[in-house]
Image (spheres, rainbow, N blue to C red):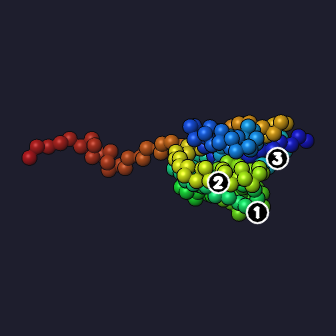
Amino acid sequence: MGIVTLGVSLAVPEPHGGLLQQRRLGFGDSAAVCIPAHVTLLPPTEVPVDECPAVEEHLAAIAAAGRPFTMRLSGTGTFRPLTPVVFVRVVEGAGECGLLQQRVREPGGPLARELPFPYHPHVTVAHGIAEEALDLAQRELAGYEASWTAHGFALHEQDGEGVWRLRREFRFPTTAAPAARLPHQQTAARRPQTTA
């Protein structure tokens, strides 16, 4: 039985995503070539190939129940000394990301799993590089600000070269269904007007 490595993320759109990816490369983190700027909703997870349709159905249902929300990034943080990571902080939209990732990993679902650390939405800008380069990333992006409206999330698959490839996007509904008119409103609309 074949196995694929999947991840679910919320993309950082252009021009912000490309800028952060280039900055990550500039700090010496070559992983940026394989990983577009994103907020993780599900870390790399191995899934049997024949379960992929159930995974996509599960994610489509989550997206259908969601709605667009504001994402705002501001400043930097780090997971050091626990892990050698510097990131841009999510200061608005973190709650929505938290709910989404819980739904993605819900018990009994096709992507159910425990996380090794508590969930903390962020955008990685340096990982596993020299301490001096991590310090530089944290310092140079300390004033970084960006915001956008998140309209959905995406499923990615890691290929044999370690590159994350888009498998499918899942969009939130953009408009609510029009409310049904109440019977008395419909009757009133047909009632002829009289003059006083």
Q: Residues within 10 Å of mark 2 (few under 14, many from 20)?
A: many
Q: Are marks 3 and 2 in contact (CB under 8 Å)?
A: no
Q: Residues within 10 Å of mark 1 (few under 14, many from 20)?
A: few
Question: Residue 13 at x, y = what percent?
Answer: 58, 40
**Residue shown at the point (51%, 42%) measured from the top left:** 174
Depth-wise, is mark 1 or mark 3 nearer the camera? 1
Q: Quadrant of residue 154?
A: top right
Residue 188 placement, left or right of 51: left
Q: Marks 3 and 2, Cα distance to the nearest angstrom?
A: 34 Å
Q: Is residue 89 above or below residue 193?
A: below
Q: Are marks 1 and 2 in contact (CB under 8 Å)?
A: no
Q: Marks 1 and 2, Cα distance to the nearest angstrom?
A: 16 Å
Residue placed furthest toward the left = 196
**Residue shown at the point (68%, 54%) measured from the top left:** 135
Residue behind mark 1: 82
Mark 1 / mark 2, whichever is N-terminal: 1
Residue behind mark 2: 138
**Residue shown at the point (32%, 48%) measured from the top left:** 185
- Helix, strand or loop status at disc 1: loop
Residue behind mark 3: 47
